[in-house]
Amino acid sequence: MVRFFYFMLWVTLQYTLRIFYKTVRVINAPKEIYGRTIYVSNHAAAFMDPLVVAGLRLPIVFFMTRSDVFTPISKPFLWAAHMLPIYRQHDGEDTKSKNDEVFDKSARVLNFGRNLLIFGEGFTDDTFIRRLKPVKKGAVRIGFYTLEKYNWKKKVYIAAVGANYTSPNLLRSEVLVANSEKFCLNDYKEAYLENPNKTINDLTKKVEHMMQEQITNVANRELAPFHEEIMRTTGKGMHPTESDFSIPLEKRWRYSQKLAQFFNDNNALIVNLQASLALRLSEHHKKAENWGITYRDIANASQGQSVSTRNEVAQMILLFPLIVLNAIHVWLPYWLIKNFVEKSFKRRVFWGSVKLLLGKIIIGLLNIPVIFLFKPLFGISNWWGFTYYLCIGLFFLGFLYWKKALYDFRKKKGLKASSIAEIMKEREELLKEIKTAIPVA
């Protein structure tokens, strides 16, 4: 049976994630609720990864989670959310015995037809980087441990998952989750019985390769910022703000993968190109930022469209009522949560996910009384109150769009056609150099 807290988190995340991210895309989504599958995911964005990967799939999963988050206070909630602790070497002297216990629990989960979600890299970079770190052997070990424990009677599968963000902590950015086909560990029974260590190593490499296919993987982490600058200049990739959003997210993700693969196949060439071009690209984008010029401004100018503030004015007028409703229902708790998270968590990589989760729970709970006010105040059914309650997230969304419209209005008021023309000419020259050196760009 699925635990109630997990079920409620899963149901409400369908709404919350689509408020946080403006585009959500899932490729090859698994359709079975059960299935004895170990899903091995990358770990690009700390606590955001389990929310996104589990929230955007149908299968019921149990999470392998670092043990240090299991405190006397958090343990009941983490248990209710299907989380199992995994112990690392620096967590204590009895790490092995504790992990043996976790392996037993994991085996029972799989034996009863449930699924596991394991973040194969084991840790998250402090700065978001589009790459796959070395994958640990734990997922494959757990799979074979389960098969041995239950005498190979049931099939156990492994599948790779890739969480791809334009920017994981940025409100109204985008996320794409890609899923591989699964393979059956039982098919490797003879190889495992003959040489367990070799089979575990070989299959871990297979899983790692499958995971690389589900993400954008810049193998040389020193080249990751340059990869980002190229995507930002062309507008065809996964940059969170400087992209051509008329291109579907999946197509832009494929482009980012193709570009990363070219980087990986031509490391020496890209290192030399970075030395000669990276600084110029960075200065170009800083100049555009200082002048308030975006990719969209350049695209509009190239199509002969003049700078106009009519759309921004219309948006600010139409969305103003939502500003008032947002102030009533969301502003104060959101401001308190934002300040608490940014002061309490030193690693910025946790900010977005913790704000999302705390905001979802605290703002949701504080506004429950609203549901029951409609009948005494307006003499109408509380079902109208419930409908209004479900719209509170949309009030926040309206506030974000109003804020963006105000920013764009102020920017456009000071925008000069000559500045756009100068940036556009610079970008055209840079694009020619990029295209000459990197054909796939």
Image (cartoon, helix red, strand yellow):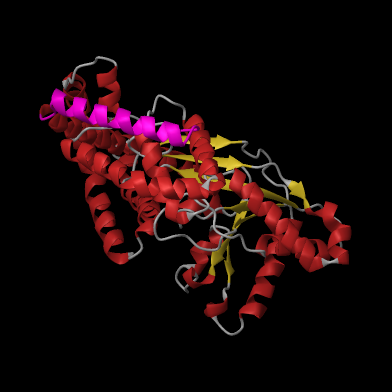
The residue closer to the viewer here, 183 or 48, is 183
Is there any visible trace of residue 107 in the rendered image?
Answer: no
Magenta stretch: dominant SS?
A: helix
The residue closer to the viewer here, 419 or 280, is 280
Task: Judge whether 437 appears above or below 122 on screen.
Answer: above
Left of 180 or right of it: where is 89?
left
In the rendered image, residue 34, in percent from the top left (x then y), is placed at 70, 47
Q: In the displayed image of the protein, which residue is found farthest to the bottom?
A: 93
- Asked where in the image residue 349 lies, by quadrant, the reply is bottom left
Task: Judge whether 165 appears above or below 133 on screen.
Answer: above
Task: Judge whether 195 appears above or below 249 on screen.
Answer: below
In the rendered image, residue 234, in percent from the top left (x then y), is placed at 38, 32
In the rendered image, residue 99, in percent from the top left (x then y), is placed at 65, 73
Is there any visible trace of residue 53 in the rendered image?
Answer: yes
Q: Examine the structure image and report whether residue 433 is included in the region drawn in magenta.
A: yes
- Asked where in the image residue 140 lies, by quadrant, the reply is bottom right
- Residue at x 86% of width, y 60% of height: 191
Q: In the displayed image of the protein, which residue is found farthest to the left?
A: 414
**Magenta-tinted stretch:** 414-441
The residue closer to the viewer here, 310 or 370, is 310
Left of 46 or right of it: where is 40?
right
In the rendered image, residue 271, in percent from the top left (x then y), is placed at 44, 50
Task: Judge whether 373 appears above or below 62 on screen.
Answer: above
Q: Examine the structure image and report whether residue 354 is included in the region drawn in magenta.
A: no
- Residue at x 34% of width, y 59% of height: 348
- Residue at x 27% of width, y 55% of height: 338
Left of 302 or right of it: where is 215?
right
